[in-house]
Amino acid sequence: MVLSKFNLEGKVALITGASGLLGQEHAYALLESGAVVVLTDIAPKRLEAAKAKLSESFAAKSIIIKTMDVTSKSNILSVSEQLANRGFRVDILINNAGIDPKVTKGKGLEDTSRFESLDLEEWKTQLNVGLDGAFLCSQIFGSLMAFDGQGGVILNIASDLSVFSPDQRIYRKEGLSENEQPVKPVTYSVIKTGLIGLTRYLATYWAHKGVRCNALSPGGVFVGQDEIFVQRLKNLIPLNRMANVEEYRSTIQFLCSEASSYMTGQNLVVDGGRSVW
């Protein structure tokens, strides 16, 4: 059966930043395909809430939660050892953790840091989570995948902003001077573009060990953002809408399963066509 290639029964998948909106969707996708999923995040209460929500649809025994700071190598190693002691081998790693300033209803971007005034420490903090975190998790869990010869899958969650620059016009707000206008920070573009470089590097580095590495670059998800922002963004997208929150599930299933067995080193852009206009 064709669909059998999407079957992940017997596989263990670890997701970073798993308590967030898309992190939970990635978990849903993998649970639906039969995997045991390890939800990791720095926020214990949010992890508990995510597990409770997912347990409404899937067996709680298939959902493991671990508080983990992706910027701490010792913390990641500790989680790896804890899982190994319970007999769990991580077959799939989804590097999803990151700091993403969001557009919210009535507020616009929560972080309005412009390039001219972006603090160096904020730059370092965001790169530490988004890039250093992906590096450390790939180093630790990817090495284990390669070491025992069984291979595995690393999936880096990038963004459509890995292939083009943010159109800052969609974030503008009436009544503000030019130097007060909200913008998508430079850190986000740098991090997501950097993840594509990491993807290509790892895809060739461990290819002979059976470790595949790809990236997913999703477009924006509609979660009730400001109507003016949504309309501006829709005008840039051939399908004339933002993504629904569940629309990336099947892509995750494809990229993490044998359905994509001959695919590695690629950045799969799923953005409603925005990047081709």
Image: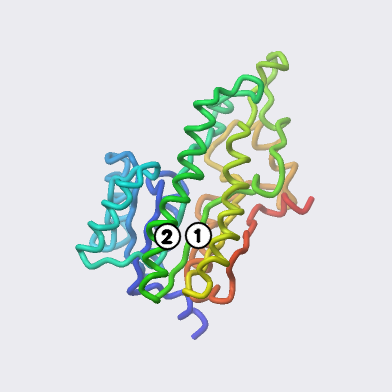
| 37 or 75: nearer the viewer | 75
x and y percent of residue 234 in the render?
A: 70, 42
Q: Residue furthest bottom?
A: 1
- Left or right of 251? Residue 29 is left
Residue 256: x and y in percent read: 48, 67
**Picture colour scheme:** rainbow
Q: Amino acid at mark 2?
A: Leu
Q: Is residue 239 above or below residue 212?
A: above
- Which residue shows up at 35% across the image and 47% down it? 73
Q: Position of residue 33 (x, y in %)?
A: 41, 69
Q: Earlier in the sequence, mark 1 or mark 2?
A: 2
Residue 229: numbered disc? none
**Residue 263: where, in percent of width, then height?**
59, 71
CA gap between label 1 and label 2 equals 6 Å
Q: Where on the picture, by quarter, is residue 28?
A: bottom left
- The residue sitting at 71% across, 40% down in the picture is 165
Residue hosting label 2: 93
Horizontal side of 226 relative to 46 (left or right) equals: right
For the point 60% across and 64% down, the residue is 265
SS for dot 1: strand
Question: Measured along the vertical axis of the image, is residue 231 above or below residue 264?
Answer: above
Q: Residue at 34% of width from left, 66% of height from top? A: 12
Name of the residue lying farthest toward the right? 277
49 left or right of 252 in image: left
Amino acid type, residue under disc 1 in the picture: Leu
Above or below residue 86? Residue 134 is above
Q: Residues within 10 Å of mark 1 (few under 14, many from 20)?
A: many
Q: Which residue is mark 1?
A: 155
Secondary structure of residue under mark 2: strand
**Given contact means CB atoms under 8 Å apart, are the residues at marks 1 and 2 in contact?**
yes
